[in-house]
Image (cartoon, rainbow, N blue to C red):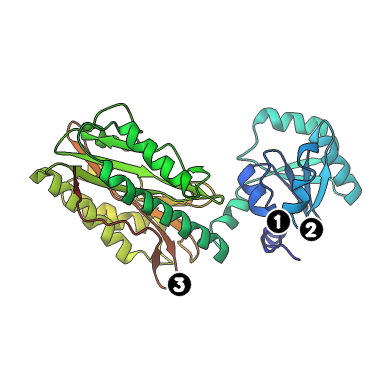
């Protein structure tokens, strides 16, 4: 059975004049072959698909990597790669320039004597940006798992509870309901710490009448979800309500107007302009969103610097925020997929200002 992902890669290779490409990064290797082992190298030519791995995976690899020729490599992987290229009559090999260190490049040049190494950037990552139906089904389930974890943890959010205990509860819930791990280190930031955009959970005790920002995700069947909600434990002040309302307005405005065909820069401006209108532009210092998939940060970006065109099948986050040092901060984040006519929101946790505890 033909591997559609490999065929799409071959089209990209043909466009760039590449005879063969070596894929060593784990996410790209998994994406192309389905192989989930910790050690393996994929080599794609216009005629063959090879997966080189070691003795440990010689039972697993043929079961997972349908359509690939599985090769048990020798003590040095590149010796086996050189033999495969020679047998195919190939003298050029592209490699993932953003995944290979200079030291590796020098070693490969010596071991692949007579083979011309050609750097290539982002070929597989470009394919990964457009999710197929199977990927979207998994990502919806990952988003639902994060939503369920947020619902579960709300009853525990009260004064005197440690941020780290809330993070642990979120992680335990997601793991016990199907996640293999978290998408990233869980953020639980309360009070003044909520002004830290990446304030990972600490031993601080949650106080009364303050913000708590929770940013977390489930790593589920090889894909990530990424959800942020900010709540108030106790009674919100007028300032709490003001900045929460602005962030919510910005996020809803972006979700309403993001469309295929616009650039990442234009999508970013949808949220950024609302926050700037209220005088808090300098307090929104990060991008409006980022790509999401096998990794929690992928292309495309919804940022002031991105000219990439949003295309149906891309999955991104939408997460504007305001951060006031000494007071606290708000971020509201959902996961979305770009559709032919607009977007579909994958996460569904409530966004009205929740007062808990």
Q: Kindly report the distance in space between the C-alpha atoms of the residues bearing marks 2 and 1.
A: 8 Å
Which part of the image, by quadrant, shows the C terminus?
top left
User: In the rendered image, which residue does mark 3 sit on?
Assistant: 340
Mark 2 vs mark 1: which is more N-terminal?
1
Give the quadrant of the N terminus: bottom right
Judged by depth in the image, the label closer to the viewer, 3 or 2, is: 3
Which comes before the other along the chain, label 1 or label 3? 1
Which residue carries the number 1 mark? 13
Cβ atoms at labels 3 and 2 below 8 Å apart? no
State the image quarter where residue 211 is shown. top left
- Tell me which numbered mark, 3 or 2, is placed earlier along the sequence: 2
Check whether the beta carbons of the residues at disc 2 and disc 1 lie within 8 A of each other: yes
Percent position of residue 184, x then y:
45, 40
Considering every residue shown, the one lying at the far left of the view is 238
Element on which disc 1 rests: helix
Q: Residues within 10 Å of mark 1 (few under 14, many from 20)?
A: many
Q: Residue at 43%, 67% (x, y): give it.
A: 260
Res 112 seen here: no
């Amino acid at each position: 059975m033909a591997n559609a992902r490999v065929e799409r890669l071959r089209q990209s290779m043909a466009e760039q004049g590449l005879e063969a490409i070596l894929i060593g990064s784990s996410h790209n290797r998994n994406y192309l072959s389905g192989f989930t082992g910790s050690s393996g190298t994929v080599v794609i030519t216009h005629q063959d698909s090879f997966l080189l791995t070691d003795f440990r995976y010689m039972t697993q690899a043929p079961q997972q990597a349908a359509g690939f020729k599985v090769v048990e490599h020798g003590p040095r992987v590149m010796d086996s790669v050189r033999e495969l290229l020679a047998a195919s009559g190939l003298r050029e090999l592209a490699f993932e320039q953003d995944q290979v260190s200079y030291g590796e490049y020098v070693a490969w040049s010596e071991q692949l004597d007579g083979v011309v190494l050609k750097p290539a950037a982002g070929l597989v990552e470009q394919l990964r940006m457009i999710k197929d139906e199977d990927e979207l089904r998994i990502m919806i389930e990952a988003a639902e798992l994060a939503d369920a974890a947020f619902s579960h943890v709300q009853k525990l959010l009260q004064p005197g509870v440690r941020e780290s205990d809330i993070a642990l509860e979120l992680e335990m819930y997601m793991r016990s309901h199907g996640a293999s791990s978290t998408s990233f280190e869980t953020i639980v930031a309360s009070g003044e710490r909520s002004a830290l955009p990446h304030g990972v959970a600490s031993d601080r005790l949650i106080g009364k009448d303050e913000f708590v920002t929770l940013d977390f995700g489930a790593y589920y069947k090889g894909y990530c979800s990424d959800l942020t909600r900010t709540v108030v434990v106790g009674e919100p002040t007028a300032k709490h309500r003001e900045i929460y309302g602005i962030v919510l307005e910005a996020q809803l405005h972006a979700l309403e107007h993001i469309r295929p065909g616009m650039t990442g820069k234009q999508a970013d401006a949808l949220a950024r302009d609302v926050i700037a209108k209220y005088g808090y532009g300098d307090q929104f210092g990060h991008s409006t969103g980022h790509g999401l998939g096998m990794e929690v940060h992928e292309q495309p970006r919804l940022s002031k610097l991105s000219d990439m065109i949003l295309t149906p099948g891309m999955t991104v986050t939408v997460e504007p925020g305001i951060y006031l040092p000494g007071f606290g901060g708000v971020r509201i984040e959902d996961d979305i997929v770009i559709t032919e006519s607009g977007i579909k929101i994958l996460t569904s946790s409530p966004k009205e200002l929740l007062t808990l505890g």
